[in-house]
């Protein structure tokens, strides 16, 4: 029987990968005082959200990955306003083009600019070594530090 799970990771400026549980990530979104990271204060760090398929409750395969950024305020809390702003940018740009609708010669410049903003400020492209390590950690092939 298959089911699915989401795995969360933060990658620091030294390429160290940290795993975050779903419960902790949810608390980060609510500005919970338990989820303060002084070592991340004032930083904008890389973030990975990995969806995996589970078979018999064991990680089986990666089915989706999103590589974006998380910003932390001067106290080390997740900057929720920036998180929402980045989500708005992704929403404006769209995630995938499911088919282009044409209206003659009209170009949707807002969509084009939104995609450039999303691709240059919200998302990041991992180097192969980092991507492999994140996927391996998602599938429990390697152990990494949890925060």
Image (spheres, helix red, strand yellow):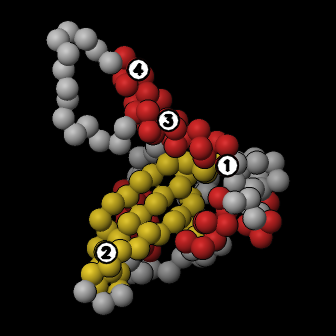
Mark 2 element type: strand
- Image coordinates for residue 31, horizontal then vertical, percent: 74, 59
Quarter-wise, where is residue 128 in the image? bottom left
Instruction: Report, in whole angstroms, how far the alpha carbon at label 1 lies from the one at label 4.
Output: 25 Å
Q: Earlier in the sequence, mark 1 or mark 4?
A: 1
Q: Which residue is mark 4?
A: 110
Q: Is residue 2 above or below residue 16?
A: below
Residue displayed at 41% across by 73% down: 5
Which numbered tag is attached to residue 89? 3
Q: Which numbered disc flags the more N-terminal residue, 2 or 4?
A: 2
Secondary structure state at the residue bearing disc 3: helix
Give the quadrant of the C terminus: bottom right
Q: Residues within 10 Å of mark 2 (few under 14, many from 20)?
A: some
- Tell which circle, 1 or 2, labels the residue nearer the N-terminal end: 2
Residue 140 position (above or below residue 115)? below
Cα–Cα span, label 3 and label 1: 14 Å
Residue 28 is left or right of residue 64, and the answer is right
Q: What's the residue at 60%, 46% (across, down)?
A: 83
């Amino acid at each position: 029987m298959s089911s699915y799970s989401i795995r969360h990771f933060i990658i620091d400026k030294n390429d160290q990968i940290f795993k975050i549980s779903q419960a902790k990530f949810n608390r980060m979104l609510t500005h919970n005082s338990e989820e303060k990271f002084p070592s991340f204060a004032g930083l904008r760090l890389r973030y990975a959200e990995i969806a995996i398929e589970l078979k018999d409750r064991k990680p089986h395969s990666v089915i989706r990955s999103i590589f974006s950024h998380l910003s932390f305020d001067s106290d080390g809390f997740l900057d929720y306003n920036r998180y929402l702003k980045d989500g708005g940018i992704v929403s404006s740009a769209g995630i995938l083009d499911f088919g282009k609708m044409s209206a003659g010669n009209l170009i949707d410049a807002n969509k084009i600019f939104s995609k450039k903003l999303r691709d240059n400020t919200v998302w990041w492209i991992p180097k192969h070594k980092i991507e492999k390590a994140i996927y391996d950690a998602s599938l429990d092939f390697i152990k990494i530090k949890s925060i």
